[in-house]
Amino acid sequence: PVKLGRIKFTYSVDKMENNYLNLSELLNFLNLKRADLMRFTNKNDPLYDASFPVSVPIGGKRNMWRRADVEAWKFRRDMDAIEAAARR
């Protein structure tokens, strides 16, 4: 709990960790290598994907990604692949 004046704020690290993915969890969830992730986020790369979820800085050089955003991106990507296969 954090106390600010007379107001006490409580927060759960477990809840935050369930809603956000760190780098290794992100790579594992998407079954990617770090180099693939860098390609999706590099605007100069042919594999660049502007719809890839933006990371949230949490201090220092650490970033996390919102789980809901990553799941939605993966779902859209999977659906696009299914639709492309169905058109063949």
Image (tube, rainbow, N blue to C red):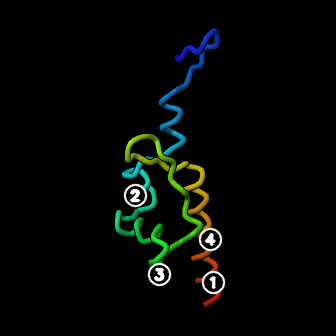
Left or right, 34 with respect to 26, comes to: left
**Rendered residue at 47%/47% (across/down):** 64
Of the two numbered discs 2 and 4 on the same chain, state the one appearing first in sequence: 2
Q: Quick check: marks 2 and 4 in contact, CB under 8 Å? A: no
Q: Residue 72: which quarter of the image?
A: bottom right
Which of the numbered marks, if any, corresponds to residue 4?
Answer: none
Q: CA distance from mark 4 to mark 1?
A: 10 Å
Please name whichever residue, 72 or 60, is drawn nearer the observer in this view of the structure: 60
Of the two numbered discs 3 and 2 on the same chain, state the one appearing first in sequence: 2
Q: Which residue is mark 1?
A: 86
In the rendered image, which quarter contains the C terminus? bottom right
Q: Which residue is mark 4?
A: 79
Helix, strand or loop at label 4? It is helix
How many other residues sit within 10 Å of disc 4, few (<14), some (14-19) or many (≥20)?
few
- Indicate which label's residue lies in the foreground, 4 or 1: 4
Q: Which residue is mark 2?
A: 27
Helix, strand or loop at label 3? It is loop
Q: Residue furthest top?
A: 6
Q: Which residue is mark 3?
A: 46
Q: CA distance from mark 3 to mark 1?
A: 24 Å
The image shows residue 52 at horizontal and vertical percentages of 55, 64
Q: Quick check: marks 4 and 1 in contact, CB under 8 Å? A: no
Number of numbered tags placed on the structure image: 4
**Rendered residue at 42%/40% (across/down):** 59
- Indicate which label's residue lies in the foreground, 2 or 4: 2
Q: CA distance from mark 3 to mark 2?
A: 20 Å
